[in-house]
Image (cartoon, helix red, strand yellow):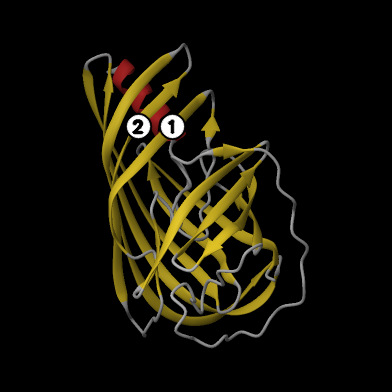
């Protein structure tokens, strides 16, 4: 029982703080610049017919957002999201942590924006902690990460399958596979103040469920992580804040992520 408990704790520790998503299973690069904090833009932007246009998430090459996250089991950390490439039917989101950049591919569909790897706009993640690192690949992605048009009380789903390896201290690896499911619902509008400014934002509630089976030396170990988050998006700006409540290996915690600076060309 002690071995089973310690392995599950290690796997959970390697998993990421989930808001709308997590940036895992993506490539690594070096270097990125921190964005400046410009004047706050208009709270509304027009919806046009461009496939990647989204009123709550400006898909523009070079757009960048810096966030700070506190309260997660992985500790406090900061990261910067940058749209490093934009295409007519999708874009690449690069996320810089200290000494590490991860990329995530998105597609633009008539219904909205969809992350092809586990995650979404406003992802908050630590990629390695206490000597334990989790790497996952995504497949069978269904649903939408962020719809193009959102109506009051609207609800939608996003899900995928995930497989990968959890590398733990002592050169021990656990093969893992499972599913990630998320349900989002619009909860109205309210004024939100974060270090980057005060915004009239759209509020969402997200419930997420990760179910994994980790194979450690022939022993099948089930891992389940539930979370419930409140998430705010400002029109014309993007993701500005989240407050996540989660059960982490039987221990509840609350983490908060806030926009620090942003730059939208």
Residue drawn 43% across the image and 32% down it: 134
Residue drawn 55% across the image and 69% down it: 59
Q: Quadrant of residue 245?
A: bottom left
Q: Position of residue 259 (x, y in %)?
A: 64, 62
Q: Would you place residue 215 above or below residue 161 in this image?
A: above
Quarter of the C terminus within the rendering:
bottom right
Q: Which residue is mark 1?
A: 134
Proximity of marks 1 and 2: CB atoms separated by less than 8 Å: yes
Q: Position of residue 262 (x, y in %)?
A: 69, 65
Disc sitting over residue 164 in the figure: 2
- Label 2 environment density (alpha carbons within 10 Å; few <14, some 14–19, many ≥20): some
Which one is in front in this view, the residue at disc 1 or the one at disc 2? 2
Q: Would you place residue 37 above or below residue 25 in this image?
A: below
Q: Earlier in the sequence, mark 1 or mark 2?
A: 1
Quarter of the N terminus within the rendering:
top left
Q: Nearer the viewer, residue 27 or 259?
A: 27
Q: Nearer the viewer, residue 26 or 158?
A: 26
Q: Would you place residue 15 above or below residue 81 in this image?
A: above
Q: Would you place residue 69 above or below residue 189 in this image?
A: above
């Amino acid at each position: 029982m002690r071995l089973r408990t310690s392995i599950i704790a290690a796997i959970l520790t390697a998993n990421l703080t989930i808001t709308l998503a997590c940036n895992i299973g993506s490539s690594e690069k070096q270097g990125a610049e921190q964005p400046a904090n410009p004047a706050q833009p208009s709270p509304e932007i027009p919806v046009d017919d461009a496939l990647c246009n989204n009123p709550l998430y400006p898909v523009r090459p070079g757009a960048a957002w810096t966030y700070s996250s506190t309260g997660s089991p992985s500790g406090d950390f900061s990261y910067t999201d940058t749209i490093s490439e934009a295409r007519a039917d999708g874009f690449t989101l690069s996320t810089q942590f200290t000494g590490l950049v991860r990329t995530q591919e998105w597609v633009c569909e008539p219904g909205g924006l969809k992350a092809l790897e586990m995650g979404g706009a406003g992802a908050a993640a630590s990629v390695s902690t206490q000597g334990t690192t989790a790497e996952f690949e995504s497949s069978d992605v269904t649903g939408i990460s962020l719809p193009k048009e959102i109506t009051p009380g609207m609800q939608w789903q996003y899900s995928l399958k995930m497989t990968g390896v959890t590398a733990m201290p002592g050169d021990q690896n656990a093969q893992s596979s499972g599913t990630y499911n998320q349900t989002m619902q619009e909860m109205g509008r309210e004024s939100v103040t974060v270090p980057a400014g005060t915004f009239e934002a759209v509020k969402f509630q997200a419930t997420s469920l990760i179910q994994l089976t980790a194979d450690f030396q022939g022993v099948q170990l089930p891992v389940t992580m539930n979370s419930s988050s409140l998430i705010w998006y400002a029109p014309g700006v993007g993701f500005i804040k989240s407050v996540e409540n989660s059960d982490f290996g039987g221990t509840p915690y609350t983490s908060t992520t806030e926009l620090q600076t942003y730059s939208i060309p």
